[in-house]
Amino acid sequence: MCKRLLSRWIAIFAVGLLGLIGLPVTAADEAPDALIKRLSSDVLDNIRSDKAIQSGDVTRIVALVDGKIMPNVNFQRMTAAAVGPAWRQASPEQQKRLQDEFKILLVRTYAGALTQVSDQTIFIKPLRAAPDDKEVVVRTEVKGRGDAIQLDYRLEKTPGEGAGWKIYNLNVLGAWLVETYRSDFAQQINSKGIDGLINGLTERNKANAKKG
């Protein structure tokens, strides 16, 4: 993949990851495609109006993630799927550290790409799902300069307190985020175990922080 295409791919992923900004936790009755349509408008408005986000201010982005994004994402499921079968062997403390470090990795990886998305618009495709489906895929296109980019969301319907649709995976240009990391994580686990993966993520995040 050429450098220009990779940069564009990361920029669209940034829209997806930070597109969760502004979602209400109580949106239990909102249809998944309506939710994605609203959040897509919200994220672009946030990017266009927030100079700190445009400049890649990681502190500002982390605050948004903690305050508004995480309550609306099944991040435990996302992390568990990326880690794979080894997740079940990890202790509760190891699972928490994996979630924390994975979140930091995603935020820092895509923070700098936000400066590239201010002139883009997201179009929601018709939803193909039955009324009683508990998991759906909402397909969108991101249009701006050049060709339209595929950006899809996998969501699950959660019951009980905080009921509503929650996102647990993203797909850009045919590559799902969870699967993208799974093979890399599996190699680290096979060679160094769960603690080796945690240490590797920690070092990676420290290196990214120095770059920022």
Image (cartoon, grey):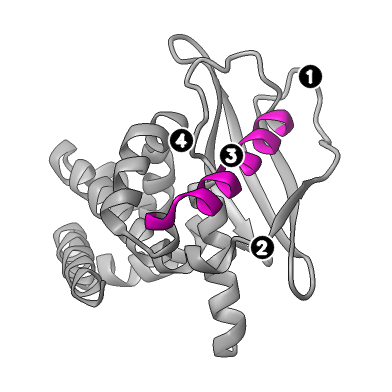
Q: Which residues are magenta?
A: 33-52
Q: Main secondary structure of the magenta part?
A: helix
Name which residue type carries label 3. Answer: Asp
Q: Which mark is residue 10?
A: none
Residue hosting label 2: 119
The answer to whether the residue labelled 1 contacts the one labelled 2, judged by CB atoms less than 8 Å apart, is: no
State the image quarter where residue 104 is shown.
bottom left
Q: In the displayed structure, does residue 119 sit left or right of residue 165?
A: right
Picture residue at 18% right of the left edge, 74% below the top: 210
Name which residue type carries label 1. Pro
Report if residue 35 lies within the magenta region: yes
User: Which mark is drawn over residue 42?
Assistant: 3
Using the numbered discs, state the Cα–Cα distance from disc 2 to disc 3 in whole angstroms. Answer: 14 Å
Q: Where 21 falls versus 18 (above or below)?
A: above
Q: Which residue is mark 4?
A: 73
Residue 155, position as x, y percentages in the image: 60, 35
Q: Earlier in the sequence, mark 2 or mark 4?
A: 4
- Mark 2: which secondary structure? loop
Q: Which residue is mark 1?
A: 131
Q: Residue at x 24, y 54 (%)?
A: 101
Question: Between 41 and 4, which is closer to the camera in this rendering?
Answer: 41
**Counting residues from the N terminus, which is met first, the one under dot 3 or under dot 4?**
3
Spatial CA distance of label 1 from label 2 is 34 Å
